[in-house]
Amino acid sequence: MDTNTNSTISKDQSESIIMINDDANGPPVIKEFFSKLSTNIEKNRRTGSCNVCSLSITDTYKTTSNFLKHLKIKHRLIFDKWKSKQDQVVQETNQPKITIAYNRDNEKYSTSNKRQQLLNNSIIRNLIVNMSLPFSIVDNQSFKHFMLDVDPKYNMINRRDITRNFLPAMHKSCIKKLQEVCNRSNYISLTLDVWSDRRMRSYFGITLHAIVDDHYKTYLLSFERLTGKYSGEKLAAEFDRVTQLYNLKDKLVRIITDNANNNQAAFNHLVLPGFDEYFDDSIDDQSELETNDDDTNNDECDKNRLEIEEVNDDIYGSTLNAPTDQEFLRLPCFIHSLQLVVHDGIKAASGALSSLKKVADLAKLAHTSNSFAERLEEHHYSIPRANSTRWNSQFQTVKKVIGIPFAVLNSILTDLNKNSTILTQGECYATISLVAPTILGILIDLEHELAASNLSLVSLCEALISSIKARFSGLLCHFEIDVPFASYSMSERFSDPIFLVTPVLDARFKFLWLDNLQGM
């Protein structure tokens, strides 16, 4: 008998057995429910007799699976009662184990954890998609520290997973939802537009308009990058892909678009007189956030710059394979045509050229001279950057400059030795109902202004009236207004009765807008 180990060693011809007394060290569950414990050194096995039923149980040394299995099957109630007491003792212990405290700081959510998935989706949807932040934000150490403060258990998503897994999955989900919307809609209209950003990268967008469950809905169906030279065939191929993907061929009733010539004219002639030099030299927009980490340099952008070719109006009809007797009409863009009217009027305002040029010079100075911009900021003024493709952007620039008190502006320029409209996109309604009331209202106001104008404004009013009658002749002829028919054949599409029906159905107008005809 070895008194130091409380063990009894016995030897025979085949094996050596160490007999461990009940008071020896061992797992609590074994000490509680089993006795006569013995260990076979050669076979690494432990055997014990159940205190309840005296059944002998054998298991691998230092494991308890067989012992626990016996208790759960044969003596479940007794075992559960003992386990609940043990759990209560652990909960009442004030001093936690050091291993628990250590693991708590390093424990991270699994990929299937709901909290992990919630934070992943929030980062992608709110920061990357909605706020247009770059993918690299998830690699930024400051952002990682921020997320550690938000939730220490959050396992930071990596950039590769975003681009290869999360975004493709979200894209498929969006397409599926859009397909469901299209399936529920019987009549659908599309808006097609070619658009270029400030770096002259061009895109082709297709927007859906439909009434779903008595609610007007607008969704973006396609937004594809265009590079090199594009023709009608390339646009038609993308148009055909979208109509097949969403099964739209038998549901389309209107397409709103302009051919390349009309778009090009609308954009190339929207620079206010005097603003030509403002747009001659590119002004770096340091405040604009670049969100693409893999943006090409300027040389590559020049190579990929879009070269516009004339687009045949019939490409969309041929894509749909519509029979000749089927009603299918492509409507022109109301805003583009109205912008051309504005340009025609501005060209006639020759007396304002010198003033507009001075305003353009001041605006350019505000965006190239830090000293001038800082002095304006001291007086709580600023001059917004003008956009060459939006006349109302230049109008707002002029308005801001005129709003600066002459004394303040003159003082700043002397110290530095420098002697020298907004119509937002419709949110919840279709803008087609605005066309007839807007054009009719503008024409009436111009004619009233012409009758009361002095000599300096007569040429401007006459130019605007002549242009609006020519470009919207198809619409105005419905009101028996004398219009030229020999010019601007593109505008004849405004003769579509839909421009008369939609404002009547619009609760904002009804028949009230027709009251203006009495004054003509």
Image: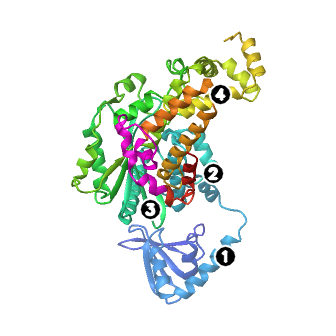
Numbered label attached to residue 150: 2
* Secondary structure beneath label 2: helix
Q: Quadrant of the N terminus?
A: bottom right
Q: Does the stretch in magenta take in 64?
A: no
Real-space Cα separation, disc 4 to disc 3, in angstroms: 41 Å
Residue at the spot of label 4: 383
Query: Residue at label 3?
Result: 211
**Numbered disc in front, either 2 or 3:** 3
Kind of residue at badge 4: Ile
Residue at coordinates 57% horizontally, 43% vertically from top-left? 144
Across and down, in percent, residue 351 comes to 59, 19
Residue receiving disc 1: 88
Q: Main secondary structure of the magenta part?
A: helix
Q: Secondary structure at mark 1?
A: helix
- Assess disc 4: are there few (<14), some (14-19) or many (≥20) residues with their C-alpha within 10 Å of its C-alpha: many
Callout 3, which amino acid? Ile
User: For the magenta stretch, what is the residue range?
Assistant: 473-502
Distance from Cα at disc 4 to Cα at disc 2: 39 Å
Question: Regarding mark 3 in the picture, which secondary structure is present there?
Answer: strand
Query: Residue 114 vs residue 369: left or right?
Result: left
The residues bearing labels 1 and 4 have C-alpha atoms spaced at a distance of 71 Å
Q: Earlier in the sequence, mark 4 or mark 3?
A: 3
Q: Amino acid at mark 1?
A: Gln
Does the image show residue 390?
Answer: no
Answer above or below: position of 247 versus 220: below
- Where disc 4 sits, the SS reads loop
Residue 402 sits in which quadrant? top right
